């Protein structure tokens, strides 16, 4: 569903509709873990990369979040009771085979043992079935469920099919990276990822006659080694002034040879300069083609630097309108502090502010890591506390929108019916 009204997008993936039909599955968020692993594998990051028929899939598959019902502004304003109860509407774009596959895949994702051992199982499957058969099985099941396409033709067909049914898409290239023991930098990998972004943005721009709100999702870890984000985050915690938003923004340029940060090594500075050039190219492309770019939030240990880089991009590209958006994870205890700090900074730097609001997808790993390393769990203690935080941030952003108008934008990115209803009712009252 997409409600474009007063600067607010309410985005619900079509999987929401399955959740409604299958409450038992909705209770489990484990499908996301499996999805992440599958996508990492598809992007050639895992030990057992999914065999690639095209180079595109190696560089990263394009995941299409399918957004549910498309409500016009008028419909949203008029709809007193928002209902998720109409299966024929919900499954309009799905064939019977796709519904059966979704049932199977989501049911399997509710078994912890399968999710926890998914990488191992994929490896065994690959050696047992052989490359070709393994790929066929994966494409027919998990990969087919979560991926919108991995060639231009397939992606275009998916986008058009959804749009013809009144559904918008939020394409996302699924190249992401977690920290490793060593920082082995493969610049050519990040360069080819950047090229894949540029090609995909151009593809989306070509479909702009159909796409009502051209949106693109970005992962900062597509452009640099995750270890550098951790290093930068530590320097930021220590108060390094050279990692300020304004200073980082000065390095966001095609030619940034003179940019450097004194606390980083030569190798780190080289990599940062390359990253800033890549991010600049992608933001510039979106700016030229008027496509909104929403940066994903990932793990807490990278969060400070990741957010700072996106604020730097906002500083450079959001002077007139909120083209670049950052994501805020409401499962974090510090979520409200994080967003109020950034709202304040955006005001001080006179930049427009775009926000994608999510609950957060990395809970298990965050908690396990906090336990292992002996620091305080950064995640809210209960599901209810996360829900309350979500609505608190929603209220904060709606308040900002009512004060700042179209200089602020909010994307309510949730499957949660209560949150969707809360957001829509806040708009219509
Ligand atoms: C369009 C879109 C974009 C997204 N982008 C991102 C992104 O950039 N980064 C990201 O991290 N996630 C992202 N997500 C995933 C999102 O963070 C959630 O994991 C997912 O949407 C499920 O949360 P929900 O709001 O839909 O509702 P629900 O299914 O009601 O909530 C489940 C969520 O609640 C939280 N939760 C569950 N149990 C507990 C507990 N015991 N204690 C505390 N909290 C708990 C977790 O965050 C869990 O994912 C995105 C989702 C969508 C729809």
Image (spheres, rainbow, N blue to C red):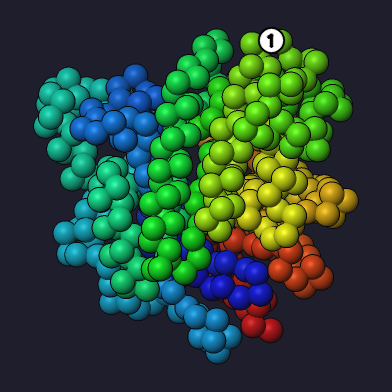
Q: Does label 1 point to a residue whose CB lies under 8 Å from ligand 1?
A: no
Give the x, y percent position of residue 329. 63, 47
Q: Is residue 152 left or right of residue 266?
A: left
The image quarter in which residue 253 lies? top right
Give the x, y percent position of residue 368. 57, 28
Q: Residue at horizontal 86%, vertical 27%?
A: 241
Q: Which residue is mark 1?
A: 266
Q: Is residue 358 visible?
A: no
Circle 1 SS class = helix
**Is 133 located above or below residue 284 in the figure?**
above
Q: Residue at horizontal 56%, vertical 26%?
A: 224
Q: Residue furthest bottom?
A: 78
Q: Residue at horizontal 30%, vertical 55%?
A: 156
Q: Is residue 218 visible?
A: yes
Give the x, y percent position of residue 82. 50, 80
**Is 199 located above or below residue 350 in the figure?**
above
Viewer-proximal residue among 30 and 188: 188
Q: Residue furthest front?
A: 255
């Amino acid at each position: 569903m997409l409600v474009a009204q007063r600067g607010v997008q309410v985005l619900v993936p079509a999987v929401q509709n399955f959740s409604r039909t299958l409450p038992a599955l909705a209770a489990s968020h484990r499908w996301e873990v499996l999805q992440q692993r599958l996508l990492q594998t598809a992007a050639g990051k895992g030990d057992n990369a999914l065999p690639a028929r095209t180079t595109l899939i190696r560089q990263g598959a394009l995941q299409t979040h399918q957004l549910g019902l498309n409500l016009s502004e008028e419909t949203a304003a008029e709809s007193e009771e928002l209902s998720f109860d109409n299966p024929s509407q919900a499954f309009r774009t799905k064939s019977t085979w796709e519904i059966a596959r979704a049932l199977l895949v989501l049911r399997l994702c509710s078994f912890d043992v399968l999710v926890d051992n998914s990488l191992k199982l994929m490896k065994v499957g690959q050696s047992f079935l052989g490359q070709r058969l393994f790929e066929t099985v994966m494409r027919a099941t998990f990969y087919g469920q979560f991926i919108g396409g991995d060639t231009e033709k397939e992606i275009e067909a998916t986008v058009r099919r959804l749009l013809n049914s009144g559904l918008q898409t939020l394409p996302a290239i699924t190249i992401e990276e977690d920290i490793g023991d060593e920082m082995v930098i493969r610049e050519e990998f990040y360069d080819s990822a950047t090229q894949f972004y540029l090609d995909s943005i151009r593809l989306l721009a070509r479909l702009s006659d159909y796409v009502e709100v051209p949106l693109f999702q970005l992962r900062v870890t597509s452009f640099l080694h995750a270890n550098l984000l951790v290093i930068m985050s530590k320097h930021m915690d220590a108060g390094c002034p050279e990692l300020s938003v304004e200073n980082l923004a000065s390095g966001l340029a095609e030619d940034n040879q003179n940019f450097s940060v004194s606390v980083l090594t030569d190798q780190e500075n080289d990599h940062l300069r390359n990253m800033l050039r890549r991010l600049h190219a992608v933001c510039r492309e979106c700016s030229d083609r008027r496509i909104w770019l929403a940066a994903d939030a990932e793990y807490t240990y990278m969060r400070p630097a990741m957010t700072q880089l996106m604020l730097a991009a906002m500083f450079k590209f959001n002077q007139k309108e909120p083209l670049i958006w950052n994501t805020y994870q409401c499962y974090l205890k510090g979520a409200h502090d994080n967003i109020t700090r950034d709202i304040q900074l955006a005001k001080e730097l006179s930049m427009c502010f775009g926000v994608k609001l999510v609950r957060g997808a990395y809970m298990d790993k965050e908690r396990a890591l906090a336990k292992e390393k002996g620091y305080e769990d950064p995640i809210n203690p209960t599901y209810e506390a996360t829900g309350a935080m979500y609505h608190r941030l929603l209220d904060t952003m709606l308040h900002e929108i009512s004060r700042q108008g179209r200089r602020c934008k909010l994307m309510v990115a949730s499957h949660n019916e209560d949150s969707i209803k809360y957001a829509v009712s806040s708009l219509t009252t």
